[in-house]
């Protein structure tokens, strides 16, 4: 008997089954407010705020101005020194859902559920999906190989049916969707909803530099490459001349340090911090030497549009 899971619309009480994906140093409160007005939901990385005080100011703004639910993305491994405080703030303000990345979500699930906050977990394979389901996750964010940022290894055509067959909680597909037709294809495979990020980088509500937005318009899928230099883990960036110049792989010293068990935690944190600074300069400084995160769906970005216009093109093309 075929299993049936609720749509993301039912889970979050939204009009369209879409999450505007959390994007490091790109997502902002204005984008989430616009998303809620457009009938979808948006999420923002907690690490987009330098301090807990700034984070809580943003949570208050979102609680006051969002017309619908919003989410927070938490990095739940030891490289995120602010994780426990961020989780406490999420529970204090009762955000609608948390998306966990890069670590075990067990503590997040336990604490969030006590205050009625849902937890969706990033997964890239069946083994980890079964693990987080066993921990009590409310949904899976199925990150496929066409996702922006930290991508998976399987296509959505492989990953969604695999998870659908073996898991009993809703599946939210992340990656590879740039238009209405692709959105319908993913939903027809059995996904409860979609998480879409790269299409919104060049939105009018986004505060990234004009150069970053124009790069999303002028570059395409063939220009997306993986780099390990930003976070220590593979993530996707636009292959600009600067990226070609600095390369995409960690050097010998970086690799040795990253594999040392005693130093791994601290080196991961250091590379993440260094990557944050590079990305921050890229996102907000209009310089030639830039490193811009994006996924292959920038292929479908042809002009700067509002969040509402981007949503409309996806749901009613």
Image: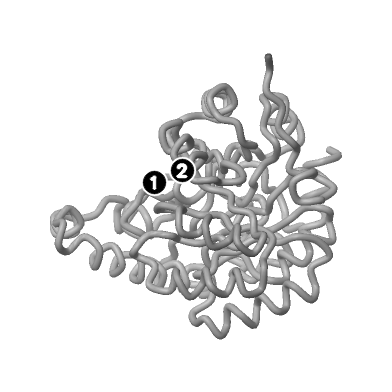
Kindly state the secondary structure of the residue where label 2 is placed: loop
Query: Viewer-proximal residue, 136 or 248?
Result: 136
Residue 123 on image: x %, y %: 48, 41
Residue 238 on image: x %, y %: 47, 51
- The answer to whether 130 is drawn above or below residue 150 in the figure is above
User: Which of the image's four quarters has the N terminus?
Assistant: top right
Q: Residue at x 31, y 67 (%)?
A: 269
- The answer to whether 96 is drawn above or below residue 58 in the figure is above
- The answer to whether 272 is drawn above or below residue 244 in the figure is below
Q: Is residue 223 visible?
A: no
Coloring scheme used? one colour
Residue lying at the far top in this picture: please name it.
1
Q: Is residue 171 visible?
A: yes
- Per the image, the residue denoted by label 2 is 151
Query: Viewer-proximal residue, 17 or 224?
Result: 17
Residue 216 on image: x %, y %: 59, 53
Q: Residue at x 36, y 59 (%)?
A: 231
User: Which of the image's four quarters has the C terminus?
Assistant: top right
Q: Residue at x 47, y 30 (%)?
A: 154
Residue 59 on image: x %, y %: 66, 75
Image mark for residue 37 = none
Kindly state the secondary structure of the residue where label 1 is placed: strand
């Amino acid at each position: 008997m075929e299993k049936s899971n609720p749509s993301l619309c039912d889970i979050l009480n939204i009009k369209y089954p879409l999450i505007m994906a959390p994007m490091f140093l790109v997502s902002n409160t204005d984008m989430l407010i616009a998303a809620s007005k457009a009938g979808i939901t948006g999420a923002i990385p907690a690490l987009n705020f330098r301090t807990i005080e700034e984070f809580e100011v943003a949570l208050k703004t979102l609680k006051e101005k969002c017309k619908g639910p919003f989410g927070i993305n938490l990095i739940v491994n030891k490289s995120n020194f602010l994780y426990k405080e961020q989780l406490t703030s999420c529970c204090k303000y009762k955000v609608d859902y948390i998306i966990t990345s890069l670590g075990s979500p067990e503590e997040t699930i336990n604490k969030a559920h006590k205050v009625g906050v849902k937890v969706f977990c990033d997964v890239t394979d069946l083994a980890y999906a079964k693990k987080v389901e066993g921990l009590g996750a409310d949904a899976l964010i199925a990150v496929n190989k066409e996702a922006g940022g930290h991508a998976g290894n399987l296509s959505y055509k492989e990953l969604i049916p695999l998870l659908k067959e073996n898991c009993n909680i809703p599946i939210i597909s992340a990656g590879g969707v740039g238009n209405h037709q692709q959105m319908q294809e993913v939903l027809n495979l059995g996904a409860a909803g979609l998480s879409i990020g790269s299409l919104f980088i060049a939105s009018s509500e986004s505060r990234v530099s004009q150069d970053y937005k124009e790069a999303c318009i002028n570059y395409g899928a063939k220009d997306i490459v993986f780099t390990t230099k930003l976070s220590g883990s593979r993530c996707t960036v636009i292959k600009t001349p600067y990226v070609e110049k600095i390369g995409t792989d960690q050097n010998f010293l970086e690799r040795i340090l990253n594999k040392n068990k005693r130093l791994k935690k601290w080196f991961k944190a250091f590379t993440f911090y260094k990557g944050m600074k590079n990305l921050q300069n890229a996102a907000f400084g209009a310089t030639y030497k830039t490193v811009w995160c994006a996924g292959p769906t920038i292929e479908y970005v042809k002009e700067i549009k509002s969040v509402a216009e981007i949503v409309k093109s996806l749901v009613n093309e």
